């Protein structure tokens, strides 16, 4: 036993730790000989940062020794995965917790104003020109999907990107995103006359989603992408905090483990930086990085024009946005100017924007202007960053994003928490550290074209006040049919109006179920060129286009039509197609005999009758029943 005490004393002496160490963490002192020199350094750091409580319940040497080493393995991981390490995390936590307790307003001294940006109208000349510019620029872009979440909040046990975006074809979100990127890649290469490279695609995963995302990609041959194009970056969790002194919280089930929770999607910036991916992309001559989230089936309809705006306006940061009603529960993109001259363009949460306006000389707060919408556009968390300035900024910050803390206090004294909290960060807060010279703007698109996230389960969606978006699997699928119907209308087809139906307690517009592969038409110009003559589609109709060169010519559709063709087959579809079609049959979201991904929508598709044609050989073909 003496040797153990001697070795502990030697360790203490080498580290220059005084005798107070033994008083504050006697159990750690007894176990120091078990630890490597790196682990002892971590122990010293924890002690210096006021974390002696972590060792209070440690057993004597010889008991749980492997668990003690595992504890330091976890500490090492928490330390290495956070910019600046655990010391920096605890220091920042203390500052933010002190501000929270004092009720400090992060916007004190700032005055809000409407930032500069582009408001686009789908299908007009300006929109078409921006789309063309965006397609041309796409060969210089990389895409980043933030996909750390499971579908539990939706009533779905899989990863969210595996959920079908719509059930007419069953295409999942991840497949849709990859096929959109590949379609952009091909169109961009065509404009560049072959001088092109593959568009890189990075996916930020978490412990919850990493292996299942990998499995989804591998079992589907990466949905047509080359495996070398796709990089998965796994986000680590951060330590939980027990009190205002930022004492790290212990796992209630394990005295040798620190409790951890997700840090937020803002981690994507640090991961891209530390992985070396940004440098790799920069060295390959890329210019843009596009960030998007996991369950918005409309997003890529807005991407080409938005990228065109970034390239034309030379925005360092371009936030995609939608028109926003005053006080609507969606953050507003706002320019904040401080009394000391600092300014930034960032997302301000809706519950902060109205009081901020009232406190800074706008007595009515957040109100609609003459357009019928708030002048502060609605943030949808899709960002386009210019790669050069982005890398320069991250060199300064190491990818760290301005954090916030949101403790749930037990009472008004704000001295203790109901449960542990942690620091969080958001992807869209990246502009907070930018210099005033940075060109930060936004691009507003119609909501029907750009934004239909799937994030609420049927019960929660059914409680949404009438007129507000449901953001459920039901509304997300219907939004895809709505957008495709309106796009075809704009392209010259006569498309019937929708009917109102109720599924899972949600009243939705049911448009014709029109879907197509991105390679058929990702931009309005492409689609317009493939619709000619007098085409009409009835409300009860379903149409699935799986080929690239399919032209609709004087088509009258009243039923279901499915066309599949190889790339070198040119198919002209016209005449009158009439059959019983496919119908929507309500299902109960509580009916466990129905698969989860169907019942969370509240309907299933009954395939009664359809005209289906497949063209597997190159050539010119005509389908006119």
Image (cartoon, grey):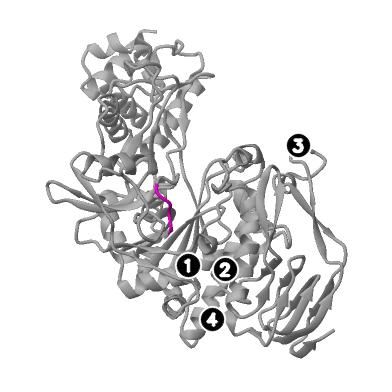
Could you say where residue 231 lies in the image, as x and y percent from the top left?
51, 58
Residue identifier under label 4: 525
User: Which label belongs to residue 180?
Assistant: 2
Residue identifier under label 1: 303
Find the magenta span and give its range: 322-326
N-term mark: 4 or 2: 2
Marks 2/3: CA–CA distance = 34 Å
Q: Main secondary structure of the magenta part?
A: loop
Report the residue at 30% width, 66% height from top.
Answer: 388
Which mark is in front, 4 or 2? 4
N-term mark: 3 or 1: 1
Marks 3/4: CA–CA distance = 43 Å
Residue identifier under label 3: 590
Could you say where residue 544 lies in the image, as x and y percent from the top left?
73, 70
The verdict on residue 544 being magenta is no
Report the residue at 46% width, 30% height from top.
Answer: 260
**Are the residues tagged 1 and 2 within 8 Å (C-beta)?**
yes
N-term mark: 1 or 2: 2
Report the residue at 54% width, 68% height from top.
Answer: 181
Q: How many marks?
A: 4
User: Which is more toward the observer, 476 or 364?
Assistant: 364
Q: Tell me, yes or no, if residue 493 can be seen here.
A: yes
For the C terminus, the image quarter is bottom right
| In-image side of 132 versus 403 (left or right) | right
Element at badge 3?
loop
Q: Residues within 10 Å of mark 4 (few under 14, many from 20)?
A: some
Does residue 538 sit above or below 256 in this rendering? below
Element at badge 2?
helix
Which mark is in front, 1 or 4? 4
| In-image side of 191 versus 102 (left or right) | right
Q: In the figure, residue 150 lies in which quadrant?
A: top right
| In-image side of 292 versus 159 (left or right) | left
């Amino acid at each position: 036993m003496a040797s153990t005490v001697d070795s502990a004393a030697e360790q203490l002496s080498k580290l220059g730790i005084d005798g107070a160490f033994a008083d504050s963490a006697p159990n750690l002192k007894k176990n120091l000989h078990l630890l490597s020199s790196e682990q002892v350094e971590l122990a010293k750091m924890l002690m210096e940062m006021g974390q002696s409580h972590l060792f209070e319940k440690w057993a004597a040497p010889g008991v749980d020794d492997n668990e003690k080493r595992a504890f330091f393995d976890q500490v090492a991981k928490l330390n290495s995965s956070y910019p600046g390490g655990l010391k920096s995390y605890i220091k920042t936590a203390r500052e933010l917790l002190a501000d929270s307790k004092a009720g400090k307003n992060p916007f004190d001294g700032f005055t809000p104003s409407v930032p500069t940006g582009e408001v686009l109208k789908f299908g007009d000349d300006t929109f078409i020109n921006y789309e063309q510019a965006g397609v041309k620029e796409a060969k210089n872009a990389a895409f980043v999907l933030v996909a750390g979440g499971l579908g539990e909040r939706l009533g779905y046990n899989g990863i969210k990107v595996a959920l079908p975006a719509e059930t007419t074809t069953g295409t999942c979100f991840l497949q849709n995103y990859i096929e959109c990127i590949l379609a952009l890649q091909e169109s961009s290469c065509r404009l560049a006359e072959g001088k092109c490279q593959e568009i890189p695609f990075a996916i930020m995963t978490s412990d919850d989603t990493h292996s299942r995302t990998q499995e989804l990609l591998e079992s589907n041959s990466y949905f047509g992408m080359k495996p070398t194009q796709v990089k998965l970056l796994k986000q680590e969790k951060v330590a939980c905090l027990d009190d205002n002194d930022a004492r790290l919280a212990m796992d209630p089930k394990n005295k040798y483990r620190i409790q951890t929770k997700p840090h937020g999607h803002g981690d994507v910036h640090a991961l891209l930086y530390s992985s070396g991916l940004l440098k790799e992309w920069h060295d390959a001559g890329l210019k843009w990085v596009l960030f998007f989230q996991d369950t918005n089936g409309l997003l890529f309809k807005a991407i080409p024009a938005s990228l065109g705006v970034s390239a034309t306006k030379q925005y360092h940061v371009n936030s995609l946005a939608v028109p926003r009603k005053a006080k609507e529960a969606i953050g507003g993109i706002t320019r904040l100017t401080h009394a000391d001259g600092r300014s930034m363009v960032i997302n301000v949460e809706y519950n902060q924007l109205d009081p901020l306006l009232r406190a800074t000389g706008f007595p009515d707060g957040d109100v609609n202007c003459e357009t019928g919408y708030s002048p502060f556009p609605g943030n949808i968390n899709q960002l386009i960053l210019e790669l050069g300035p982005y890398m320069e900024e991250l060199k300064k910050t190491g990818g760290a994003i301005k954090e916030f803390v949101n403790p749930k206090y037990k009472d008004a004294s704000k001295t203790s928490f109901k449960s542990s909290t942690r620091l969080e960060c958001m992807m869209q807060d990246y502009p907070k550290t930018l210099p005033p010279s940075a060109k930060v703007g936004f691009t507003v698109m119609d909501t029907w074209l750009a934004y239909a996230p799937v994030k609420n389960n049927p019960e929660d969606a059914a409680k949404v006040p009438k007129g507000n978006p449901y953001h459920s699997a039901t509304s997300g699928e219907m939004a895809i049919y709505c957008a495709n119907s309106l796009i075809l209308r704009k392209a010259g087809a006569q498309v019937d109006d929708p009917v109102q139906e109720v599924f899972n307690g949600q009243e939705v517009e049911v448009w014709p179920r029109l879907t197509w592969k991105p390679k058929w038409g990702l931009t309005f110009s492409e689609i317009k060129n493939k619709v000619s003559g007098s085409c009409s589609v009835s409300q009860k109709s379903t149409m699935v286009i799986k080929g690239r060169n399919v032209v609709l010519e004087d088509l009258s559709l009243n039923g279901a039509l499915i066309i599949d063709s190889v790339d070198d087959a040119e198919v002209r579809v016209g005449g009158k197609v009439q059959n019983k079609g496919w119908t929507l049959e309500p299902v109960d979201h509580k009916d466990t005999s129905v698969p989860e991904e169907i019942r969370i929508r509240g309907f299933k598709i009954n395939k009664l009758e359809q005209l289906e044609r497949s063209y597997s050989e190159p050539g010119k073909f005509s389908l006119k029943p």
